[in-house]
Amino acid sequence: MTSVLIVDDELFIVELYRDILQLRGYKVMGTAFDGEEALRKYNNSDDKPDVIIMDHRMPVMNGVDATKEIIRLNPSQKVIFVSADVLVEKEARDAGAADFLPKPFRMDDLIEKMEKISRFH
Amino acid sequence: MTESHPIHGIDRLSTFFMDLLSHDVLNNNQAVLSYLELVLANPDLDAKARDYAEKAISHVRTSTVLVEHAKNLMAARTADPNSFRPIDLMRSVMLAIKEVPRFFPTKKIRVRVVQGPTDAYVLGDALADDLVLNAFIDMIRTDPGDEVAIDVRIIKSEQGSKMCWSLVLSDPNAVLRPGMKSENLSALLSQDNTKMVKMTGFLFASIASHLLGGEFVAKELGTGQGSEFVLTLVKAGKP
């Protein structure tokens, strides 16, 4: 079962991703509301997620900075960047994100990308 | 005497405000889209309800495009034109062809690329992709039929001393709304704007292309021949 860490500052978005991903058979192993919390949870967890779904515009630490840190700790970690700001795509990929989805997107598109990434994991 | 902020500071703050506004609206659109997906995932959903949900999804997409237009226009107003990245116009067309059916779930859309050079690079950044998609959406909106056929040509052109590429979209059944027939932005401003409706896409294309140094023109082709949109953008070197 593919495991996921969801990082987004909007509670309703986190809950939605969590509910839909669980319905579709994914294991949501954690949630975080900013990049720093994501980094802390990632560091403190022995069991790393297969995929991290990462927002960009968040308080304390944004998604690009959090992705850079996580990839520095674990270069093989798969991060799917999701953002309403399409202009941040290049920055996200340079930071190490494996893929990018502009908001709003259909969950089928996210799941397709997660499946593709997991196959090469 | 009151102290005033430098105007460029206000412009930058306004751009920042639009970034935040669009971020919040798009997050809400994400929620609406995802809830509709949850509804559609119900195998017992009847056909009528499924149809309603699909139509609601297409409206979420339209609302997203409208917000993106406002955000990108605001950003382009304060950007340095020299900083715009070259964009492959044919790539933008192919993206738009893939994307546009999602906005019109009840229409059958056929697009034929009559002339599509692979070396048509224009100055445009992400705004060029928006402009091309917007041109397709507007063209389809001006066609009242359920089946839409659009021909696409990308041709070399000139604007004053500037070398350009023009994207020409033509549809034999497209009917222009009165405000679209203005010859230029000044003529558009001189019209009674209380009578202009469903013009956001056209206005966006006119203003955005102007900010990029180009233009957007809508033409009637004559009785029974439909209309065409011509989006002209300044030629750029291959990156």
Image (tube, grey):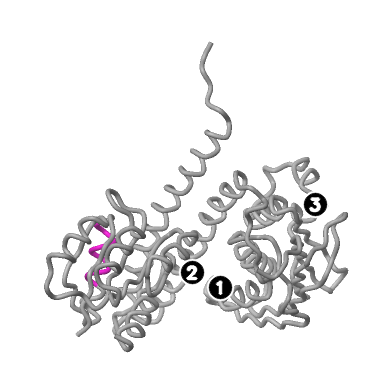
Secondary element at tag 3: loop
Reply yes or no: does residue A13 show up in magenta.
Answer: yes
- CA distance for labels 2 and 3: 29 Å
Secondary element at tag 1: loop
Q: Which residue is mark 2?
A: B58
Q: Which residue is mark 1?
A: B104
Disc 3 marks a residue whose amino acid type is Ser
In the foreground, A63 or B93: A63
**Residue B2 vertical placement versus A32 (above, below):** above
Marks 2 and 1 on same chain: yes
- The answer to which image quadrant residue A26 occupies is bottom left
**Residue A57 vertical placement versus B189 (above, below):** below
- CA distance for labels 3 and 1: 27 Å
In the foreground, B238 or A63: B238
In the foreground, A8 or B121: B121
Q: Which part of the image, by quadrant, shows the N terminus of chain A?
A: bottom left
- First in sequence: mark 2 or mark 1? 2
**Chain of the residue that carries numbered disc 2 in the rendered image:** B
- CA distance for labels 2 and 1: 7 Å
Q: For the magenta stretch, what is the residue range?
A: A11-19
Q: Position of residue A29 (x, y in %)?
A: 16, 72
Q: Position of residue B143 (x, y in %)?
A: 69, 70
Residue B178 placement, left or right of A68: right
Q: Which residue is mark 3?
A: B182
Disc 1 marks a residue whose amino acid type is Phe
**Chain of the residue that carries numbered disc 1 in the rendered image:** B
Secondary element at tag 2: helix
The residue shown at (78%, 40%) is B190
- First in sequence: mark 2 or mark 3? 2
**Chain of the residue that carries numbered disc 3 in the rendered image:** B
- First in sequence: mark 3 or mark 1? 1
Disc 2 marks a residue whose amino acid type is Ser
